[in-house]
Image (spheres, rainbow, N blue to C red):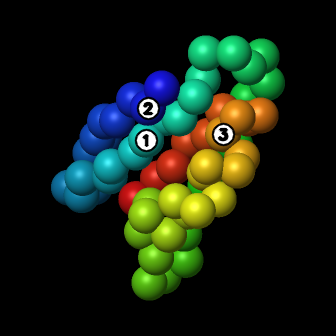
């Protein structure tokens, strides 16, 4: 399950994805990219990590 949304901060729109949160009792893992990365940089890791952990992927 993927939930997407946007928040506004200092006039900028920040896109996020909340991935696979239903089955886990722990806090989600926050995925943040570097200077030249966006949320798509994590796609290959999300497939491996999301079955065991909830993820918050921020653009």
Residue position for label 3: 50
Q: Is residue 44 left or right of residue 51?
A: left
In this view, the residue farthest toward the bottom is 36
Disc 3 and disc 1 in contact, CB within 8 angstroms: no
Above or below for 48 versus 2: below
Which residue in the protein does label 1 denote?
17
Q: Which residue is mark 2?
A: 2
| Residue 19 pos. (x, y %) | 53, 35
Report the Cα–Cα distance between label 2 and label 1: 6 Å
Label ID, residue 38:
none
x, y percent for residue 28 = 68, 34
Q: Disc 2 or 1, which lies upstream in sequence?
A: 2
Q: Earlier in the sequence, mark 2 or mark 3?
A: 2
> Residue at the spot x=43%, y=41% of the render?
17
Looking at the rendered structure, the secondary structure element under dot 1 is strand
Frontmost of labels 2 and 1 is 2
Residue depicted at x 43% and y 64%: 40
- Mark 3 or mark 1: which comes first in sequence? 1
Mark 2 surroundings: few (<14), some (14-19) or many (≥20) residues within 10 A: few
* Residue farthest along the left direction in this orientation: 11
User: What is the x, y in percent for residue 58?
Assistant: 46, 53
Q: Residues within 10 Å of mark 3 (few under 14, many from 20)?
A: some
Choose between 33 and 10: the one closer to the eye. 33
Mark 2 and 1 residues: CB-CB less than 8 Å, in contact?
A: yes
Question: In this rendering, would 34 be left or right of 17?
Answer: right
The answer to whether residue 32 shows anywhere in this view is no
Q: Relative to residue 59, is residue 52 depicted above or below?
A: above
- Residue at left offset 24%, top offset 58%: 12
- Quote the CA–CA distance across marks 3 and 1: 12 Å
In the rendered image, which quarter contains the C terminus?
A: bottom left
């Amino acid at each position: 399950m993927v939930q997407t949304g946007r928040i506004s901060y200092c006039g900028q729109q920040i896109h996020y994805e909340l991935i696979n949160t239903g089955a886990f009792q722990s806090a989600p893992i926050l995925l943040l990219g570097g200077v030249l990365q966006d949320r798509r940089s994590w796609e290959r890791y999300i497939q491996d990590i999301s079955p065991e952990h909830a993820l918050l992927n921020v653009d």
